[in-house]
Image (cartoon, rainbow, N blue to C red):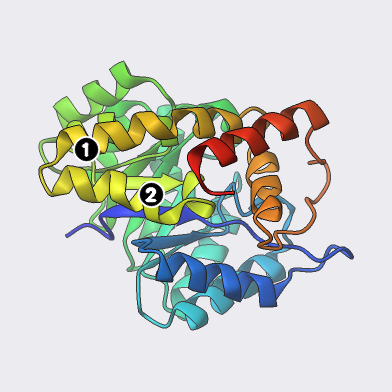
């Protein structure tokens, strides 16, 4: 059984002006997501600026999220690292807090071989009992998980159950699903490819868009699963201009700006991320108005 089906939000981590985590705003965001039909919360991923959180902050945000959600929907914690020992530490601690699953990003910068990736992910998964979803995002990590490696991991490691595919390479994803034999739970890691990946047998999306449009993102998935493929496709296509605006600069710069425009208090970005260029902010605001969320 999949960790979740539908639209999971890759939730942002709000910060106060002094750079501290804003737990009050974070709690509000969690409630907003649940009230608007989000199917799961993915905490401390790329969108949550996990790379600039200290280990203590990282684990505290995960713990806080689990407590606030209180079992209403699944919570998946981002606990990957380019250091296997660090990933094991974060994963075993997160498991103690009661997370429903873990999201493990490809080790970045190291550029491991496929053999190395297999050993890394197996070592981390073997340290816990909760389900593990791999996260393939070569544009950020400099390293791609080959379809054969994903299938091997999902076949040979009991609690590695699927992959968040953010390569954008549809041919690679088609190959993955052709090899999967039902053993890989596929999640779209790109908001502009939700319906296409559902059509390949995907379970849902781990979404940036859902931060600002949770109900609409949920509906893209819900319509597809209800057999309304045309409706899902229509919702997907309607969201494309906003998706483009949300990725006109590196994530999560635009989505934090979008949340602040909505008055949701995402706060500042931690350096080296910075505020988006004004011309892009104007385009983002227009896209949000055209989509009906501002």
Residue at the spot x=29%, y=27% of the render? 147
Q: Which residue is mark 1?
A: 231
Q: Position of residue 133 (x, y in %)?
A: 36, 51
- For the residues labelled 1 and 2, say whether their Cβ atoms are less than 8 Å apart: no
How many C-alpha atoms fall within 10 Å of the one at disc 1: few (<14), some, or many (≥20)? some
Q: Is residue 85 visible?
A: yes
Q: Is residue 162 visible?
A: no
Instruction: In this rendered view, identify the residue nearer to me: 111 or 259.
Output: 259
Q: Is residue 58 above or below residue 152?
A: below
Q: Is residue 228 above or below residue 172?
A: below
Q: Position of residue 90 (x, y in %)?
A: 56, 64
Q: Quadrant of residue 159?
A: bottom left
Q: Secondary structure at mark 2?
A: helix
Q: Position of residue 288 (x, y in %)?
A: 58, 40
Q: Which residue is mark 2?
A: 216
Q: Position of residue 164 (x, y in %)?
A: 38, 42
Q: Is 28 situated left or right of 94 in this image?
A: right
Task: Tell me which label, 1 or 2, sits earlier in the chain.
Answer: 2
Instruction: In this rendered view, identify the residue nearer to me: 278 or 205.
Output: 278
Instruction: In this rendered view, identify the residue nearer to me: 289 or 141.
Output: 289
Q: Secondary structure at mark 1?
A: helix
Q: Is residue 29 above or below residue 207?
A: below
Q: Split into 4 quadrants, where in the image is the N terminus?
A: bottom left
Q: Quadrant of residue 56?
A: bottom right
């Amino acid at each position: 059984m999949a960790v979740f089906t539908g639209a999971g939000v890759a939730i942002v981590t709000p910060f106060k002006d002094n750079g501290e985590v804003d737990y009050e705003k974070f709690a509000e965001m969690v409630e907003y997501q649940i009230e608007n039909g989000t199917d799961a919360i993915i905490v401390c991923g790329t969108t949550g600026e996990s790379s600039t959180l200290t280990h203590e902050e990282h684990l505290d945000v995960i713990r806080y999220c689990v407590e606030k959600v209180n079992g209403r929907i699944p919570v998946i914690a981002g606990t990957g690292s380019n250091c296997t020992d660090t990933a094991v530490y974060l994963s075993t601690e997160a498991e103690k807090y009661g997370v429903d699953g873990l999201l493990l990003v490809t080790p970045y910068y190291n550029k491991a071989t496929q053999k190395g990736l297999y050993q890394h992910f197996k070592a981390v998964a073997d340290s816990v009992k909760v389900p593990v979803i791999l996260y393939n995002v070569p544009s950020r990590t400099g390293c791609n998980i080959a379809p054969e490696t994903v299938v091997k991991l999902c076949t040979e490691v009991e609690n590695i159950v699927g992959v968040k595919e953010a390569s954008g390479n549809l041919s690679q994803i088609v190959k993955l699903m052709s090899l999967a034999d039902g053993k890989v739970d596929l999640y779209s890691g790109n908001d502009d490819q939700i319906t296409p990946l559902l059509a390949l047998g995907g379970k849902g999306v781990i979404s940036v868009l859902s931060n600002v449009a949770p109900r609409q993102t949920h509906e893209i998935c819900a319509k597809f699963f209800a057999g309304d493929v045309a409706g899902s496709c229509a919702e997907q296509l309607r969201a494309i201009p906003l998706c483009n605006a949300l990725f006109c600069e590196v994530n999560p710069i635009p989505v934090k700006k979008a949340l602040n425009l909505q008055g949701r208090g995402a706060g500042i970005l931690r350096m080296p991320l910075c505020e988006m260029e004004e011309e892009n902010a104007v385009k983002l605001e227009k896209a949000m108005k055209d989509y009906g969320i501002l």
